[in-house]
């Protein structure tokens, strides 16, 4: 996606609404909805397939930075 690591690190807490250090599908969906572009389940699956490197169903800060970088 071409975002700098610094910008990705700044964005992470905005997406991580509950502050647990991980982004869930629900948190990511809320971000898209807030921005006026709801995400389909298929789009969510594609994002998590690419971003969730350890396949635990959540996106860590490190995974988020790599995904957006």
Image: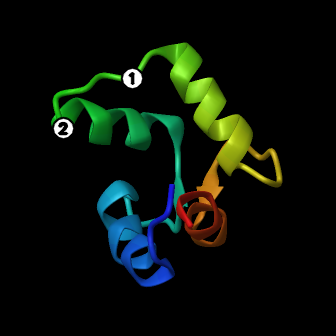
Q: On screen, 54 above or below 69?
A: above
Q: How many marks?
A: 2
Image check: 37 left or right of 55? left
Image check: 21 left or right of 11? right
- Could you tell me residue 44's position as x and y percent? 54, 27
- Could you tell me residue 9's position as x and y percent? 44, 77
What quarter of the picture does the C terminus occupy? bottom right
Question: What's the CA distance linking mark 2 and mark 1?
Answer: 10 Å
Residue extending farthest to the bottom is 6
Residue at which label 2 appears = 35
Q: At 43% from the left edge and 71% from the top edge, which residue is drawn?
A: 8
SS of the residue under disc 2? loop
Q: Which mark is residue 29?
A: none
Q: Residues within 10 Å of mark 2 (few under 14, many from 20)?
A: few
SS of the residue under disc 1? loop
Q: At 41% from the left edge and 41% from the top edge, which residue is drawn?
A: 28
Can residue 17 be seen by looking at this rendering?
no
Q: At 63% from the left edge and 26% from the top edge, which residue is drawn?
A: 45
**Quick one: 13 or 8, which is closer to the camera?**
8
Q: Which mark is residue 39?
A: 1
Can residue 43 be seen by looking at this rendering?
yes
């Amino acid at each position: 996606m071409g975002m700098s690591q610094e910008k990705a690190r700044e964005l992470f807490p905005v997406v991580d609404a509950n502050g647990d250090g991980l982004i869930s599908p629900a948190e990511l969906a809320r971000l898209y909805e807030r921005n006026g572009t709801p995400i389909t389940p298929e789009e969510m699956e594609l994002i998590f397939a690419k971003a969730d490197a350890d396949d635990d169903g959540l996106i860590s800060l490190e995974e988020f930075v790599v995904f957006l970088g």
